[in-house]
Amino acid sequence: RARPHSSRLRGCGHCSGASANVSSRDARRVQRALGSVGARARRRATKQSMAEIPARRLRRVQDADLDGKVVLVRVDHNCVRNGTLTDAFRVDATIATLYNIVERGGRPILMTHVGRPYDKKTNTIQVDDDESVAAAVRYLSSKLGVTFACPTFAADKGTGQGIVDIDTSVNWLISDLKQRRVGGVYLPNARWFKGEEGFFGAESQQRLAQQLAGLADVFVNDAFGSWQSHTSTVEVPKLLPSYAGLLMQKEIKALKCLLQPKRPFLAVVAGAKLDTKIGTIKAIASKCDALMLGGSLYNAYLCAKFDVMIEGVSDEDIALAKKELLCPEIEQKLVPLMTVVESDSIDGCGCVPRDGVCGTDTDVSNPHTTPPTKLLHLRDLKKGQKYGYVLDVAPVSFADVRVKQAVSSANTIFVNAVMGLTSSGFHEGTEALDLAISNNKNAYKFFGGGDTLAEFKSLSPGLYMSALEDPKFYLFTGGGTVLKAIEMDGAEGLATVQALMEDGDEREANRTGRAEPKCMALSSCDCGVPEE
């Protein structure tokens, strides 16, 4: 007789027996130890008892029973802009997990978010084809040679609160999925649902979580880049057996290499506003041996350091830079980039600067005319002077002895940076940075961030393609998650990862009776030892 559908939900009180509360049992064990000993022995007993409690670890998809199960897979395919797929790398990175699920008998339902459809001003969700998952689905279908069914759910046009409920018509598609008439089901943009981001109350979140959990038997989170505590990443794992996908595991492992780096450790960080990155900068500075800044972050530092004004840098950022970036803990690790590119206009002059200098002809008959884009050396900055827009770092900066030493001597390098305003043609600094880092063949190099990877691929396609195959490179799919995890001193601090953690007793139960490949009994077997 088929078991009730609700029994597949974690915590169902109607169909499953009471589960042991491991943490409560451990606490009682400690209390018993404390009851009969003195103060000194009590402390010793506490240490010993807590040490015996097995450490928590990530539940892994390779440990799950997937045969004949419908698996809800949360992915991060947030690489669609204006209805077009802009970066296939994020989609490709999830294929290993999808193959693992299908190869072991699972039937996948995919879900991702795309863009930011919520409008804060109107408190509405904009359901627009430009932020549809269709482009990602087309690419994935073509890549795998299978059909993905894409259900359509009506949005509430009256309130503008997006998709309120998952329509029961999806059950027809799940039936096709189980019968292998389709290769997978791909749900609409997660952020089109009223209950996803929590803007409309906890009740709508719980409603969506219950409906999503009702579609599947197992939940797999492979969306490392989606670190926010949203319904599809944090609430659903409370209702279903939940596991980390292969990409999630891979990203967390790479992150640990940054938190425990092989030294010297060089970090390169850039951004548009200092106030949103200062926490990250302080966290990274506490771990790295050398730090480079780019973009508006470096401009704010220059204003604070040399007491100058640069167009586009706010007084708030300058004040924050004086308070935070000039403190000895950070400034002594900063590697100065001695030459930058100054422009009269934030859009440049329409040309692509060469060696930081505008290619537009100037009036040679007038010796006082200067090109609209020119090099600006830090040694020439004058206190109290006002300068134009600083839109890039000049390539010559990377020939400076201190910069070359910092890059060439590093054994670990982390890059979350686009050095210039590439949309206006100021890309030489980013190209020079990528080349300098790539020339260090000994270092482990980690690139993270959507813009960072997009510009790496666009400006240095040869280096990018080499990096994909080079074991010394790692390209994160979720740069924002990396920065957040560094601030929190580890991925274990993220709610999305905590939702996938198991305790020690659960770990042993999951591993009981697991069969290994028979070939591993042979001395010639090259399967390797399973990772813990």
Image (tube, grey):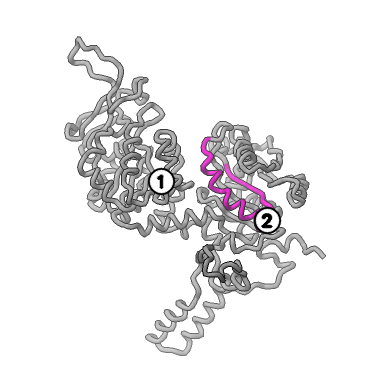
Q: Residue at x 60, y 66 (%)?
A: 517
Q: Answer whether residue 198 is magenta in the image.
A: no
Is residue 149 left or right of 232 when viewed as pictured? right
**In the picture, which quadrant includes the N terminus?**
bottom right
Residue 106: give its label: 2
Decide if residue 210 is in sight here.
no
Q: Earlier in the sequence, mark 2 or mark 1?
A: 2
Choose between 194 and 236: the one closer to the eye.
236
Picture layout, residue 167 above or below residue 250: above
Q: Give how far across and how far down residue 326 sits, in percent.
A: 24, 46
Amino acid type at circle 1 is Phe
The residue that disc 1 covers is 447
Q: Which residues are magenta?
A: 86-113
Whole-Å distance between the Cαs marked 2 and 1?
A: 32 Å
Q: Answer whether residue 95 is magenta in the image.
A: yes
Q: Give how far across and how far down residue 233 sits, in percent.
A: 57, 53
Q: Residue at x 40, y 54 (%)?
A: 486
